[in-house]
Image (tube, rainbow, N blue to C red):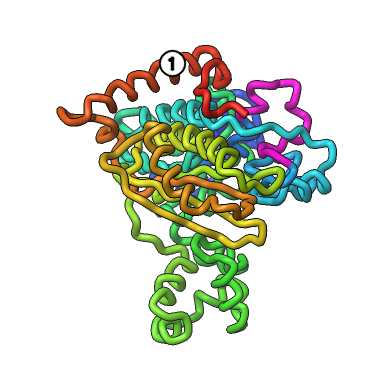
Amino acid sequence: MPSLCRDCCLVADAFPGPRCPGCGEGRLVHHRSLSRLTIAHVDCDAFYASVEKRDRPELAARPVIVGGGTRGVVTAACYIARMSGVKSAMPMFKALQACPDAVVIKPDFAKYAAASRQVRGLMEALTPLVQPLSIDEAVLDLAGTEALHGASPAAVLARFAASVEQQAGITVSIGLAANRLMAKIAAGRGKPRGFTVIDAEESASLLAPEPVRLLPGVGAAMARKLEGMGITRLGQLQGLAERDALRRLGDDGPGLVRRSLGLDTRRVDPAREAKSVSAETTFDCDLSDPRDLERHLWRLCEKLAVRLRGHELAAGGVVLKLKTSRFALRTRAARLSSPTVLPDRMFDLARSLLAKEATGVAFRLIGIGANPLVAGALADLGDLADASTPRRAAAQAAIDALRGRFGTAAIGRGRSLA
């Protein structure tokens, strides 16, 4: 059976034993379709926490939670913390109850965006068909690259994983499959540092015993609906005829059945834009003073600007998100006169939206998002009637350069001060 050593990237028709004959290591991959599959899903392992551990080696063996504030939520957790039950989006107080010895670190999104760009650069050296899905994952199509790299996609991906560890200081898990859906599912197996291969012939049988929530797009509401029909496993979905799926599950039913069989016709599209880019924070105590809310809003606009640049996108408008002390959600949106990645332009517009809501109501959360998203190359160009925007862009570039050299706390604007 075709085999690959993930350490020295040796490929052979078969290895004689449990260890690689070339390097003596035991991280081997065996699969009948190893040499012919080309669709890969790459997922950085516990990305934010891994970047923090990279920069603070003394935390390597400690449980690490990335998040902030006793009333905040977990942004990310390392695998050690996850073993204690800590999960993303868990309230921080519950996370610390589950893992009281965890080290809590406030997120540094500028640092994470830089690491993401570094990993993406290594991906783009493999193939032009790279579609980022989020800051820490992407899907690649390596079809036709064998002559370029002198190796099969599987071997190239093993080299890539080693390069990420050496150059970026973090680890990735890889799923190699016949389509995007199965590549994503494969990448979720064997983490961290996983390398899982699934071909089309085995997809349906592998999925059959899995819970319906395994499928991307099946959330809690859909899972409850399916459970009400007696469907809890993907194998039960696989048995539905298209007419029955349409009758019982509506227009999405036939597509859901196809996905339960591991079928997916989506192509890797490098031009596909991210659906949303946003930032939010939960306060340690409820806030109603507009000045306090504006300070938090400004910091979020700075984070949003960093994330947009990391995705090479710009904001065509902003969406303000507020949650009251009674958990009532309010969203307000407005369009910008021209696309931007400047935090002050987004802040000016979002502050006008906030002024209409900050009328004495106590809020526990504030967030800011970019919508619609446009290409980053269109941002802050200015024109004859707007000579100030290019100057503001130049000033922001100078700030970014200083922060890149001396850290995010090296320079800031007065409105961010308490």
Apparent side of residue 249 relative to residue 219 in the rendered image (left or right): left
| Occupied quadrant, residue 111 | top right
Residue drawn at x 27%, y 24% as measured from the top left: 390
Asked if residue 62 is among those painted magenta in the image, a careful observer would answer: yes
Apparent side of residue 52 relative to residue 5 in the rendered image (left or right): right
Task: Judge the density around disc 1: few (<14), some (14-19), many (≥20) Cα neighbours within 10 Å.
Answer: few
Asked if residue 147 is among those painted magenta in the image, a careful observer would answer: no
* On screen, residue 234 above or below 119: below
| Occupied quadrant, residue 346 | top left
* On screen, residue 188 above or below 171: below
Residue drawn at x 15%, y 28% as measured from the top left: 384
Apparent side of residue 252 relative to residue 57 in the rendered image (left or right): left
In the image shown, does 92 or 136 lie closer to the viewer?
92
* On screen, residue 305 above or below 399: below
In the image shown, does 4 or 323 lie closer to the viewer?
323
Q: Position of residue 36 (x, y in %)?
A: 39, 46
User: Can residue 14 be spotted in the picture?
Assistant: no
Magenta residue span? 51-69
Q: Specify the quadrant that holds the C terminus.
A: top right
**Residue at the left extreme of this rendering:** 384
Q: Position of residue 64 (x, y in %)?
A: 73, 35
In the image shown, does 210 or 136 lie closer to the viewer?
136
Q: Position of residue 52 (x, y in %)?
A: 64, 28
Q: Amino acid at mark 1?
A: Ala
Question: Which residue was labeled with disc 1?
Answer: 401
Residue drawn at x 66%, y 44% as measured from the top left: 283
**Residue at the front extreme of this rendering:** 359
* On screen, residue 78 above or below 58: below
Q: Position of residue 168 (x, y in %)?
A: 53, 24
Residue drawn at x 61%, y 65% as measured from the top left: 210
User: Can residue 157 be spotted in the picture?
Assistant: yes
Count all numbered tags in the image, as a single digit: 1
